[in-house]
Image: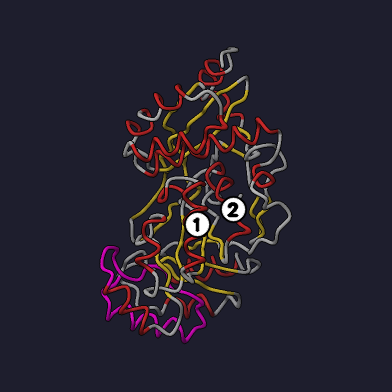
């Protein structure tokens, strides 16, 4: 199999503010794996380019995309970071579906199953901007409000004044335990349905402290990377947010979901601010989730890929084989060299 990757930068339509700071552009490693004239696409935000390149030798030694599990096992055993593994895993799944001539969801046995609605996120912003956002998104069934350490939960009241639907709050690790509990009670008064990652990651006692005292379910995000974290989080939180770049790809995500079910944890499937390629990959597993947070490409100004459509909370996957993602015209020019190199007739 042939392998190539490049780093691209994608612009947001407007700055997005969260506890992580102000984001105006997102950097992604785009991976392409070629085999018998077919090309599998994968991408991951924030992957170390050197780690992605380190995957090349293993991929070039593989004969077919049907070796997906073996390849991913070698990359994991080799200590390749999850984000880099995720991009490769995504490309191999896409290639496998194309080799079989089937959409990936069909190969996974998930076609035609019911899919929960996805939330759309609102970044930290002034009250007048929050009101405007709430009104413009009134047709969405679920909104997710990002918070910062300065938030005390009262901003939800502002949003609730113009929005009657379901609201989730993402703390992104903003608060100390006691403050988080106070925020949780304020959120509960305004009908917020869940609180995600209220305390900084890495402190199991703090997470349990908030979860035990909050009047609404607490979910772990930054505290849950992959399958290895599920047993530790059992009894600490009500659910977990799984992201491909954290766990290492679709194979690891499916394992994490299965373990979460056995542990009695609810499952949210999430994403980063990223292109439609990454969102479409995670959306293949949407029927396995209780909740979705798959809006990462909605706010991009120049998405290089076309994939899953997300409109008013409804996720619609493209019909093509594999992930069904296509490169936009801008991306075609940018990646012309990659396509030429990988589709030159070699296997």
Q: Nearer the viewer, residue 75 or 314?
A: 75
Residue 137 percent across, percent down from the top left: 60, 65
Q: Is residue 25 above or below residue 131?
A: above
Disc tally is: 2
- Mark 2 lies on a secondary structure that is loop
Query: Which residue corresponds to the image point at 41% horizontal and 47% vertical from the top-left?
Result: 24
* 147 on left or right of 139: left
Residue 241 on image: x %, y %? 46, 61
Q: On the image, numbered disc 1 is attached to which residue?
A: 270
Disc sitting over residue 144 in the figure: none
Span of residues in magenta: 175-204
Local packing at callout 2 (Cα closer than 10 Å; few below 14, some 14-19, many 20+) is many
Q: Which mark is residue 285?
A: 2
Q: Is residue 16 above or below residue 77?
A: below
Relative to 345, say whether 312 is above or below.
below
Residue 231, image x and y in percent? 38, 65
Q: Nearer the viewer, mark 1 or mark 2?
A: 2
- In this view, the residue in front, 190 or 236, is 236
Q: CA distance from mark 1 to mark 2?
A: 11 Å
Q: Residue at x 26, y 74 (%)?
A: 205
Q: In terms of image quadrants, where is residue 163?
A: bottom right
User: How many other residues sit within 10 Å of disc 1, few (<14), some (14-19) or many (≥20)?
Assistant: many
Label 1 SS? strand
Q: Which corner quadrant holds the C terminus?
A: top right
Q: Is residue 126 visible?
A: no
**Mark 1 or mark 2, which has the lower sequence index?**
1
Residue 26 seen in the figure: yes
């Amino acid at each position: 199999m042939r392998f190539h990757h490049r780093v691209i930068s994608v612009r947001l339509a407007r700055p997005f503010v969260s506890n992580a700071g102000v984001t105006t552009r997102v950097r992604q490693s785009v991976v392409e794996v070629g085999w018998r004239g077919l090309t599998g696409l994968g991408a991951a935000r924030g992957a170390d380019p050197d780690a992605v390149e380190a995957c090349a030798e293993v991929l070039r030694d593989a004969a077919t995309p049907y070796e997906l599990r073996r390849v991913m096992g070698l990359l994991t055993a080799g200590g390749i970071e999850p984000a880099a593994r995720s991009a490769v895993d995504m490309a191999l799944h896409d290639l496998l579906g194309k080799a079989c001539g089937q959409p990936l969801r069909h190969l996974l046995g998930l076609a035609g199953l019911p899919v929960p609605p996805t939330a759309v996120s609102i970044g930290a912003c002034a009250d007048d901007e929050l009101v405007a956002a709430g009104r413009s998104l009134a047709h969405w069934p679920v909104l997710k409000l990002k918070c910062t350490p300065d938030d005390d939960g009262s901003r939800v009241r502002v949003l609730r004044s113009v929005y009657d639907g379901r609201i989730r709050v993402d703390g992104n690790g903003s608060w100390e335990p006691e403050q988080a509990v106070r925020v949780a009670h304020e959120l509960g008064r305004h009908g917020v349905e869940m609180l995600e990652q209220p305390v900084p990651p890495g402190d199991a006692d703090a997470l349990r402290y908030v979860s035990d005292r909050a009047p609404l379910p607490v979910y772990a995000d930054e505290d849950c990377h992959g399958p290895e974290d599920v047993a530790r989080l059992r009894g600490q939180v009500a659910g977990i947010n799984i992201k491909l770049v954290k766990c290492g790809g679709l194979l690891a995500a499916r394992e994490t979901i299965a373990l979460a079910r056995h542990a009695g944890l609810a499952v949210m499937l999430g994403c980063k601010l990223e292109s439609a390629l990454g969102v479409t990959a995670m959306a293949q597993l949407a029927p396995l989730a209780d909740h979705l947070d798959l809006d990462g490409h909605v706010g991009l100004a120049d998405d290089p890929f076309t994939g899953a459509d997300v409109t008013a909370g409804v996720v619609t996957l493209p019909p093509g084989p594999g992930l069904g993602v296509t490169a936009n015209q801008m991306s075609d020019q940018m990646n012309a060299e990659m396509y030429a190199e990988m589709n030159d007739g070699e296997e």
